[in-house]
Amino acid sequence: MKLVKWTLWVTMLTITSFAAQARDSRQNFNIEMALAEGRNKGVIATDIQLRFGEDSLISGTKRIGEYTANKKTNAFNKTDMEACHWAFLSAIKSLQNRARKQGGDAVVNIRSNYKQQDFRSATEFQCGAGHLMAGVTMVGTVVKL
């Protein structure tokens, strides 16, 4: 019985210490730098325009709908920037695919919405980075120009 209690105590201590070391830091990264990387790798298409930040909705456009892309990636053995760029590019690719599917040719008013906190910027996106995972949530409006 003492062995069972001892084992349970050690297990709980180990789990608690891992939880105390867990990291979930919210960081901002440069949009253009990530997009350039995505274009170089062929991840980001050029047929669907992308506009970031507030007031990027173009007048005279047909608004199709607002869509969300929530993407996560394995951050193990990657820098925060590498992991966050990958998650961001996956989310943007998802928004572009949605635009194509819905008959749009642009995604505008693109913004971060990590953990339900709206962040609008024409130059930066937000990413949550931890020891094992990194993730972004991007929201954008699909339009037909």
Image (spheres, rainbow, N blue to C red):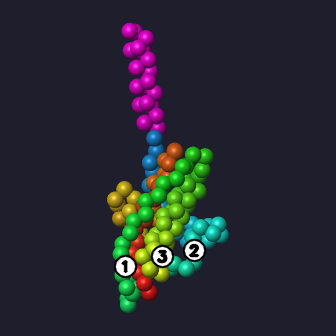
How far across and how far down the image is residue 127, in percent? 47, 58
As helix, strand or loop, the secondary structure at mark 1 comes to strand
Eyeballing the image, is 112 above or below 26?
Answer: below
Residue at the spot 34% in from the left edge and 59% down from the top edge: 116
Q: Can the viewer see residue 26 in this picture?
A: yes
Among the 4 quarters of the image, the one containing residue 40: bottom right
- Residue 122 seen anywhere in this rendered image of the structure: no
Q: Measure the C-alpha gap from mark 1 to mark 2.
A: 20 Å
Range covered by the magenta-colored residues: 1-21
Q: Is residue 5 magenta?
A: yes
Q: Is residue 76 left or right of residue 129?
A: right
Q: Position of residue 49 (x, y in %)?
A: 51, 79
Please name whichever residue, 124 or 68, is drawn nearer the observer in this view of the structure. Answer: 68
Q: Residues within 10 Å of mark 3 (few under 14, many from 20)?
A: some
Residue bearing the label numbered 2: 45
Q: Secondary structure at mark 2?
A: loop
The residue singled out by tag 1 in the image is 64
